[in-house]
């Protein structure tokens, strides 16, 4: 099982890649059979690394920056609040989700759930 | 299903009761068959309202105050960061967990998971 430091490293790497990485690089952090629900309650759960890669490919070309606000690691899970600023050229948007990740024995992300709604998205 | 406002109200009521309520009052917010894992990875999951009541009874007599830092409501779930200050008389302690709650159709808490570790507990 990954220790708290390894989990924190993966969370930080995830945020770095969400800001400026490729969908392939992000998908590589996930387990083969991982699941992603972003946002929670949005009606869609992406199952498996190929589907997850597709999900991130949709936003791969948006310039962005993700900054960690606060992180809790507990057992082989993590919950963290972060600030995502997306630059669409003519406008930009800020979203501050709380994400929850469960990690598998190899330290890969086994599931990710992102808690946010339109109410948490601000046009800058 | 409860709406976002009802979920936010229950989270705020929960924090109020964690600060100064009784175990019975807190347990009343939970569904009959709810589960509580606090902290996540701590090795113990409390199943059912009676067990949950017992869990809160252990800390019922500690004076405390819980303040919401930030809340996300998504679907019928919520994730929130809060600051819990516990007064033990001779000393006091601050813990800042991120909690995740799932709500059932009646707006009762169906599951709660608290993300924190000793590293997040500070003696004041």
Image (spheres, coloured by chain):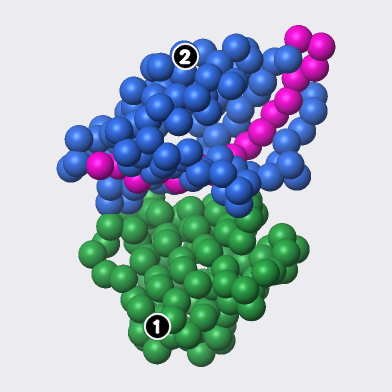
Chain colours: A green, B blue
Asked if residue B67 shows in the view, the reply is: yes
Residue at the image point whose x is 49% and y is 77% from the top = A63
User: Which of the chains bears the disc numbered 1?
Assistant: A
Q: Position of residue A42 (x, y in %)?
A: 26, 62
Viewer-proximal residue among B93 and A90: B93
Q: On the rendered structure, is B12 left or right of B81? A: left
Q: Is residue A23 above or below residue A7?
A: below
Q: How many marks?
A: 2
Q: On the rendered structure, is A66 left or right of B86? A: left
Instruction: Please identify the quarter of the rendering in which residue B121 is found.
Output: top right
Q: Would you call the spot at circle 1 few (<14 residues within 10 Å), some (14-19), or many (20 or more)?
A: some
Q: Is residue B92 above or below residue B40?
A: above
Q: Position of residue A59 (x, y in %)?
A: 40, 79
Q: Would you call the spot at circle 2 few (<14 residues within 10 Å), some (14-19), or many (20 or more)?
A: some
Residue at the image point whose x is 37% and y is 30% from the top = B49
Q: Give the residue pinned by disc 1.
A: A48
Q: Position of residue B20 (x, y in %)?
A: 51, 13
Q: Position of residue B37 (x, y in %)?
A: 51, 43
Helix, strand or loop at mark 2: loop
Asked if residue B70 shows in the view, the reply is: no
Magenta segment, prevailing SS (helix, strand or loop): strand
Helix, strand or loop at mark 1: loop
Viewer-proximal residue among A97 and B108: B108
Residue at the image point whose x is 58% and y is 21% from the top = B58
User: Considering the image in quadrants, where does the C terminus of chain A appear?
Assistant: bottom left
Q: Is residue B16 above or below residue B89?
A: below
Q: Magenta segment, which residues? A: B89-104
Q: Give the residue pinned by disc 2.
A: B21
Residue at the image point whose x is 51% and y is 81% from the top = A31
């Amino acid at each position: 099982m990954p220790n708290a430091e390894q989990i924190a490293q993966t969370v930080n790497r995830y945020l770095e890649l969400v800001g400026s990485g490729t969908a392939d690089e992000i998908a590589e952090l996930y387990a083969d059979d991982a699941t992603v629900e972003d946002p929670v309650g949005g009606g869609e759960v992406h199952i498996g690394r190929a589907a997850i890669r597709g999900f991130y490919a949709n936003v791969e070309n948006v310039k962005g920056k993700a900054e960690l606000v606060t992180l809790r690691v507990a057992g082989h899970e993590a919950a963290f609040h972060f600030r995502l600023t997306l630059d669409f050229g003519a406008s930009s948007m800020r979203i501050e989700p709380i994400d929850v990740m469960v990690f598998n024995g190899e330290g890969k992300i086994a599931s990710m759930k992102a808690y946010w709604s339109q109410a948490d998205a601000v046009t800058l």
